[in-house]
Image (cartoon, rainbow, N blue to C red):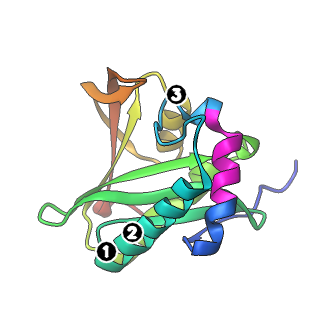
Amino acid sequence: MADPISTAIRPYARADADHLFAAARESIVELEPWMPWCHPAYTIDEARAWIELTLIGRQDGTMYDFAITADGSYAGACGINQINAQHRVANLGYWVRTSCTGQGVAPRAVRQLLDWAFGNTNLNRIEIVAAIDNPKSQRVAEKVGAHRDAVLAQRTMVRGQPTDAVMYSVLRANWT
């Protein structure tokens, strides 16, 4: 059996814009239904603007987004956002470029992100919301040991239409 791909996460840098742009363009067909930001007209300026937003968010503590690398090359992104400081809860999101899917990159990156989040924030609960029709995203949540809490009616929008979503959670007390 081949060795798994070496996977790491790191904070975004401005120099990642071209890599983000290329990965998004490669993955439009797979990502667009679930992530409307990834659309056929996606531009390098949108990639640059996103990275600037992540840098500002990290500085002010409103979001912590990371580039995912696989064997040293840009493979996607994961992050903690929608942070509710009062209730110590946040959302966790992820995506992996098409050429890196099915190789365990997303679960390895999400585990690293959870380690980082529980080691560097006071968050108590981290939620993953996956559209009911997105089994690949649900599988990632399950592989990292997230608890399937509920199916929420019309929780997300997919292609402009409300759709049900599965809510997963990872609690600080249960994370090892």
State whether residue 152 appears in this view: no
In the picture of the structure, the residue carrying the numbered disc 3 is 135
Q: Which stretch appears magenta?
A: 19-28
Which one is earlier in the sequence, the residue at label 3 or at label 2?
2
Q: Secondary structure at mark 1?
A: loop
Assess whether residue 27 is covered by the magenta stretch. yes
- Residue type, numbered disc 2: Ala
Image: 113 above or below 128: below
For the residues labelled 2 and 1, say whether their Cβ atoms are less than 8 Å apart. yes
- Residue type, numbered disc 1: Thr
Q: Quadrant of the C terminus?
A: bottom left
Q: Secondary structure at mark 2?
A: helix
Q: Nearer the viewer, residue 4 or 90?
A: 90
Disc 3 crowd rating (10 Å Cα; few below 14, some 14-19, many 20+) is few
Assess whether residue 55 is covered by the magenta stretch. no
Disc 2 crowd rating (10 Å Cα; few below 14, some 14-19, many 20+) is many
- Residue type, numbered disc 3: Pro
| Picture coordinates of residue 44, whole percent (x, y) | 61, 55
In the picture of the structure, the residue carrying the numbered disc 1 is 121
In the image, 113: left or right of 85?
Answer: right
| Picture coordinates of residue 72, whole percent (x, y) | 76, 68
Q: What distance separates the C-alpha of mark 2 from that of mark 1? A: 6 Å
Image: 21 above or below 86: above
Q: What distance separates the C-alpha of mark 1 from that of mark 3? A: 29 Å
Which one is earlier in the sequence, the residue at label 1 or at label 3?
1
Secondary structure predominantly adopted by residues drawn in magenta: helix
| Picture coordinates of residue 98, whole percent (x, y) | 70, 40
> Which residue is rendered at x = 31% and y = 63% of the image?
172
What number is the disc on residue 6? Answer: none
| Picture coordinates of residue 11, whole percent (x, y) | 53, 73
